[in-house]
C-alpha cells in the first residue's frame, strides 16, 4: 500500500503533467495563426518538455542532498553564463538575454533561478547549522549573515538587470526574500527583513530610473503615458491583452477562436508572456480560474513536501521552488490583467520557452527527490 509521501509524489507528478499537456495544447492553439511556422513552436515545446521530463526523472533518482556539494559550482556557472550573455550575445527586441545554439537559443537567467535557489539554500543551511556558534550579537549577524546575503543576491540581480530582464530580477529577489523568512534566526528576523526590504526597494528604484522604457511602463500602468496608444508601445500591448481577457467573459469565445492572438498581440507574445490572455479569451473566467486553481494546488503540494521534510536543506529548496513557481505565476497573470505593470515573465509550464520549461521541470524533479528521501526516512 502506498505511503502518504508516495501519494503526495504521485499528486505532484499528475498535476505537473496536466499543466504540461495543457501548455502544449495552448502553445499549438496560440501559434496556429503563424502559418509559416504552424508546427515549429509546438515541435520545439514538445522537445523541451521531453528533455525537461528526462532531467526531472534523473534529479528524482539522485539524492537531492548531493546538490549541496555542487551549489558553489552551479552559482559560478550561472555567473559565467550571465557574463557570456552580457559580453557576447546580440540584442533581441532591445533585450540581451539569450545564448544562440544555432537551431535555437537558451536563457541563462532562467537557469539562474534554479541554481540560485540551490546555492542560497545550501548557504543558508550552512549558516543555520553553525548560527549558534557564529551569531552571538547584532554585529556578528550583520557580518556573518546579512552582508554576505545581500552581496550574493545583488550580484545575481545586477547581472540579470544588465540584460534588461526586470521580471526575472524581481523573481530572484522575491525568492531570496521568502527563503529568508523561513530561516530560523528569529532573534534578528524582523531586523533582517527590514534591511533587506529597504535595500531591495532602493535597488528597484535605481533599476527603474536607469532605463527610460521602465519608467514608460509604470506611467502606462498609471495611465499617465502620452504614448500609450502607439502601435508598438507597452500601452498598446496592455490594451490588446485586456481586450482579449475582457472578450472572453465568463465562458470564453471558444477553443481556438481567439481574435487577439492572430491580429493584435505583438509578435509571438500570444505564446509567451501573454498566453494567459489567450486562455482567458478562449476559455473565459471559468477556464482562467481552473488554471489558477491547478497552480495553487501544485504550490500547496510542494509546500507539503517542505513541511514534511526534517532536513533543513530540503526545506529551503522546497520553499524556494514553491516560491519560484508561485511568484512567477502571480507576476505573469497580474501583469496580464493589469494589476501590475507589464513585464516579461513566462507562465510556468504554459508559456512557450525551452529554458523556462526545462528548469521548472528540473525543480519538480528535485521536489520529488526530497519527497522520496523523506519517505525513506519514514519507511
Image (spheres, grey):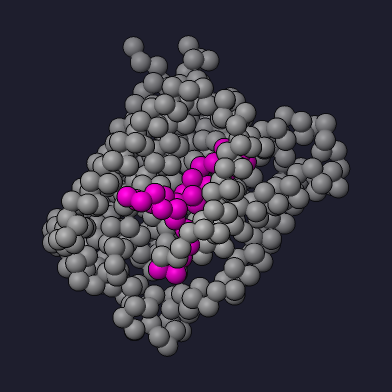
Residue visible at 47% across and 18% down in the picture: 375
Residue visible at 27% across and 46% down in the picture: 44
The residue closer to the viewer here, 222 or 187, is 222
Q: Residue furthest bottom?
A: 226
Query: What is the x, y in percent for residue 250?
Result: 20, 61
Viewed as shown, does residue 33 lie left or right of 269?
left
Residue range highlighted in magenta? 93-120
Viewed as shown, does residue 199 lie left or right of 306?
right
Q: Is residue 356 magenta?
A: no
The residue closer to the viewer here, 204 or 119, is 119
Determine whether 96 is above or below 220 in the image. Answer: above
Query: What is the x, y in percent for residue 315?
Result: 56, 32
Quarter assignment of residue 345 = bottom left
Determine whether 216 is above or below 177 in the image. Answer: below
Q: Which image quadrant: the N terminus?
A: top left
Residue visible at 80% across and 32% down in the picture: 132
The residue closer to the viewer here, 260 or 58, is 58
Amino acid at each position: 500500500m502506498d505511503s502518504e509521501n508516495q501519494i503526495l509524489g504521485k499528486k505532484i507528478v499528475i498535476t505537473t503533467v496536466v499543466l504540461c499537456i495543457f501548455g502544449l495544447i495552448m502553445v499549438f492553439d496560440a501559434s496556429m495563426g503563424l502559418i509559416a511556422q504552424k508546427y515549429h513552436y509546438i515541435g520545439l515545446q514538445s522537445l523541451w518538455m521531453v528533455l525537461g521530463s528526462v532531467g526531472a526523472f534523473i534529479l528524482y533518482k539522485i539524492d537531492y542532498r548531493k546538490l549541496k556539494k555542487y551549489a558553489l559550482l552551479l552559482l559560478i556557472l550561472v555567473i559565467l553564463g550571465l557574463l557570456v550573455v552580457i559580453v557576447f550575445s546580440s540584442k533581441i527586441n532591445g533585450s540581451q538575454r539569450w545564448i544562440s545554439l544555432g537551431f535555437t537559443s537558451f536563457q541563462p537567467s532562467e537557469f539562474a533561478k534554479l541554481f540560485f535557489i540551490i546555492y542560497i539554500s545550501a548557504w543558508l543551511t550552512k549558516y543555520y547549522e553553525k548560527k549558534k556558534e557564529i551569531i552571538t550579537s547584532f554585529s556578528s549577524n550583520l557580518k556573518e549573515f546579512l552582508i554576505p546575503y545581500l552581496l550574493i543576491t545583488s550580484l545575481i540581480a545586477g547581472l540579470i538587470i544588465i540584460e534588461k530582464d526586470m521580471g526575472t530580477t524581481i523573481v530572484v529577489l522575491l525568492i531570496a526574500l521568502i527563503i529568508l523568512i523561513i530561516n530560523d534566526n528569529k532573534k534578528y528576523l524582523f531586523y533582517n527583513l527590514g534591511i533587506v526590504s529597504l535595500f531591495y526597494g532602493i535597488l528597484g528604484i535605481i533599476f527603474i530610473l536607469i532605463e527610460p522604457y521602465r519608467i514608460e511602463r509604470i506611467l502606462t500602468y498609471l495611465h499617465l503615458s502620452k504614448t500609450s496608444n502607439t502601435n508598438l508601445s507597452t500601452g498598446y500591448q496592455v490594451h490588446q491583452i485586456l481586450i482579449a481577457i475582457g472578450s472572453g467573459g465568463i465562458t470564453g469565445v471558444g477553443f481556438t477562436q481567439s481574435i487577439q492572438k492572430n491580429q493584435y498581440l505583438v509578435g509571438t507574445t500570444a505564446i509567451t508572456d501573454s498566453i494567459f490572455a489567450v486562455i482567458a479569451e478562449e476559455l473565459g473566467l471559468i477556464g482562467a480560474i481552473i488554471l489558477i486553481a491547478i497552480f495553487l494546488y501544485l504550490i500547496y503540494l510542494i509546500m507539503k513536501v517542505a513541511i514534511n521534510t526534517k532536513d533543513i536543506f530540503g526545506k529551503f529548496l522546497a520553499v524556494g521552488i514553491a516560491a519560484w513557481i508561485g511568484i512567477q505565476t502571480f507576476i505573469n497573470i497580474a501583469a496580464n490583467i493589469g494589476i501590475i505593470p507589464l513585464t516579461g515573465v513566462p507562465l510556468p509550464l504554459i508559456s512557450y520557452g525551452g529554458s523556462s520549461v526545462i528548469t521548472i521541470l528540473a525543480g519538480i524533479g528535485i521536489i520529488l527527490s526530497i519527497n522520496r528521501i523523506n519517505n525513506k526516512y519514514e519507511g
